[in-house]
Amino acid sequence: MDMRPGGGFETEMSESDGPFQPHVKGCFLEVVQAERIVFTTVLVEGWRPFEPWLAMTAIISMADEGSGTRYTARALHRNEKDSKKHDEMGFQDGWGTTIDQLGKCAMQLS
């Protein structure tokens, strides 16, 4: 993972405790430490165009709130069909689980 504008990443996923498999490639568009991360799957490292199986841009925002952090995630899709496909795949549950895991990890580090 090359976490800078134009830097690339590749995620892997595991289903039913199986082996991890390539999931999605993408490119970071904006990275502001402790504030904002924007990435897309329609570009890969070095701003190269890419034809993904699911086109989306994600905007992750973080802001201090009380003794914690407000985390907001938005997923922008090319069209309603892609948005629905992502939702049917469990987008809400998947990202929610990830946030729960991130919160537990952060609590252990504090």
Image (spheres, helix red, strand yellow):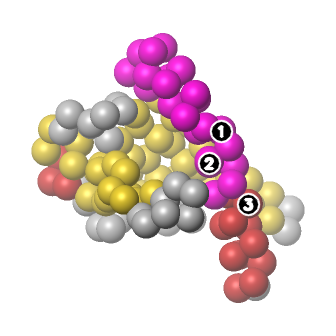
Q: Residue placed at 57% from the left, 57% from the top?
A: 16
Towards the viewer: 52 or 47: 52
Residue that label 1 marks:
92
**Dots 3 and 1: beta carbons under 8 Å?**
no
Q: Residue placed at 23% from the left, 42% from the top?
A: 43
Q: From what the image shows, is residue 64 above or below residue 50?
A: below
Residue 37 part of the magenta segment: no
Image quadrant holding the C terminus, namely bottom right
Residue stretch in magenta: 77-98
The image position of residue 100, as x and y in percent, is 73, 60
Does residue 71 appear to the left or right of 8 in the view shown? right
Q: Earlier in the sequence, mark 3 or mark 1?
A: 1
Spatial CA distance of label 2 from label 1 is: 6 Å
Image quadrant holding the N terminus, namely bottom left
> What amino acid is at disc 3?
Asp
Task: Classify 10 Å Cα crowding around label 3: few (below 14), some (14-19), many (20 and above).
Answer: few
Spatial CA distance of label 3 from label 2 is: 9 Å
Label for residue 95? 2
Spatial CA distance of label 3 from label 1 is: 12 Å
Does residue 35 appear to the left or right of 55 in the view shown? right
Towards the viewer: 45 or 92: 92
Q: Secondary structure at mark 2?
A: helix
Label for residue 100? 3
Is residue 64 in sight in this rendering?
no
Q: Earlier in the sequence, mark 3 or mark 2?
A: 2
> What amino acid is at disc 1?
Gln
User: Residue most toward the right?
Assistant: 66
Is residue 41 in sight in this rendering?
yes
Tell me the chief SS of the magenta region: helix
The image position of residue 73, as x and y in percent, is 60, 43
